[in-house]
Image: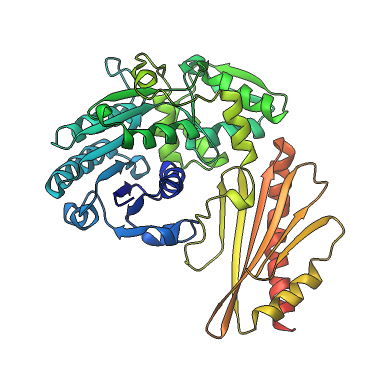
Amino acid sequence: MDKVILVTGATGYIASRLIPRLLESGYRVRCLVRDPLRLKGRGWFRHVDIFQGDATLPATLAPALEGVHTAYYLIHNMSSGRGYLARELACAHNFAVAAEEAGIEHIIYLGGLADPEQHLAPHMRSRIETGEMLRQGKVPVTEFRAGVIMGSGSISFEMIRFMTELFPIIPGPLWMKNKSQPIAIQNVIDYLLSALKTPHARGGIFEIGGPDVATYADMLLCYARVRGLKRLMLLFPGIPVWLMAFGVGLMTPVPRPIAQALIAGLSNDSTVQHNQALRVFKDIRLISMDEATEYALQRTKPTLVERIWEDGRPGPKALKHEGFFINYRRMDLNIAPENAFRVLRRVINKPRWRVEINEQNQRIVVREMDLHSGDQWIEWKADQSGVLTCISQTVFFSPRGLPGFLYWLILYPFHIVYMKKLEKSIRES
């Protein structure tokens, strides 16, 4: 297809799932991003056009919008802390004006599912008002409003995953009894793609949700059931939002500022009140909460994870991401890749490891077998740049319950020691 599709917020979760589907459908994809290096580790990095820009700086938008047919607006500013509502509206205004000046035909926006007539927390209010600001321009806007998105890597799902894995008895506030209508990430992307081919949907606002209405507590217990964990909920009155956000920021991949905004937004029901989406987009098969959870768990594999840590920046990295504890380290050596791999093959010969070697891609992956506290892989890759060979080691550990978290805390320092010993062995080879 000749249509150029612009995806803003390209480093975000929704974009990471949308862009491959757009490419599979034959569209030319252009990404707008503040820091292009953050896309370097994505599998689709070489198949898209990347423009550096920032919606808070209107002058940077025009080059990215030139020649674009449709733009996906997936920008949010929750991580920027206080005053993010004003920044959200300023970004939406700047983008609407720039899109109109560029003559693009269509904007597709993903917002939040909430009743605008209710008293809403700032996060949910910002999602509603962002859509209103985009519609003030002359470019037709298709707005989808979604609640909890079920998928590996989704902020909401990762909160559910890590909290349920960690606590045998899960503490929570009383508003965990509020209702939501979670939607599978596959269905969110189905709607976003269908909007490209549904001209009569332009200008519409569509509330989207899955087939199940559940409380927030039900979603945690659903995860536990599918995962095979025994869990109980214990709800307390009066737990302050800041305390919940502190705990979530400490124990899950969700940064505290984002956790605080999201948790405050859970104080209202979030269910579909108007079903136009089902009538307009008739070909979409909705996925149940159980099925979405099962699919998300199936994606907890190193080969399927978005490699957000591979950005070319030096230094070790430790993060929680898509169900994994990840530890990444690299070393630059004046040695041929085949010599480095010869040492690696010798030192990883352990009975409990299943070894996969890909000589062409200069990659070795081992999986530790019979580990009851979780699943662990270690991956080594060799990349040559001039006379130097970069050897990277990435440890992926998916914890199973509280023992998995304790296992990782105990094991983590040993990975650092192991990497130093490995580097010494390679240098002396």
- Give the left or right position of residue 74, taking residue 260 as reference: left
Q: Is residue 247 visible?
A: no
Q: Position of residue 7 (x, y in %)?
A: 33, 47
Q: Is residue 11 visible?
A: yes
User: Is 33 rendered above or below residue 196?
Assistant: below
* Outermost residue toward the right in this view: 351
- Give the left or right position of residue 6, taking residue 383 as reference: left
Q: Position of residue 415 (x, y in %)?
A: 70, 60
User: Is 341 rendered above or below residue 202?
Assistant: below
Q: Quadrant of residue 364?
A: bottom right
User: Is 411 rendered above or below residue 226?
Assistant: below
Q: Residue at x 69, y 82 (%)?
A: 427
Q: Residue at x 49, y 34 (%)?
A: 186
Q: Position of residue 121 (x, y in %)?
A: 34, 25
Q: Nearer the viewer, residue 20 or 111?
A: 20
Q: Nearer the viewer, residue 49 or 251?
A: 49
User: Is 273 rendered above or below residue 61?
Assistant: above
Q: Position of residue 351 (x, y in %)?
A: 87, 58
Q: Residue at x 57, y 49 (%)?
A: 305
Q: How many marks?
A: 0
- Give the left or right position of residue 85, taking residue 282 as reference: left
Q: Quadrant of the C terminus?
A: bottom right
Colour logic? rainbow
Q: Residue at x 47, y 20 (%)?
A: 181
Q: Nearer the viewer, residue 19 or 380?
A: 19
Q: Nearer the viewer, residue 197 or 136?
A: 197
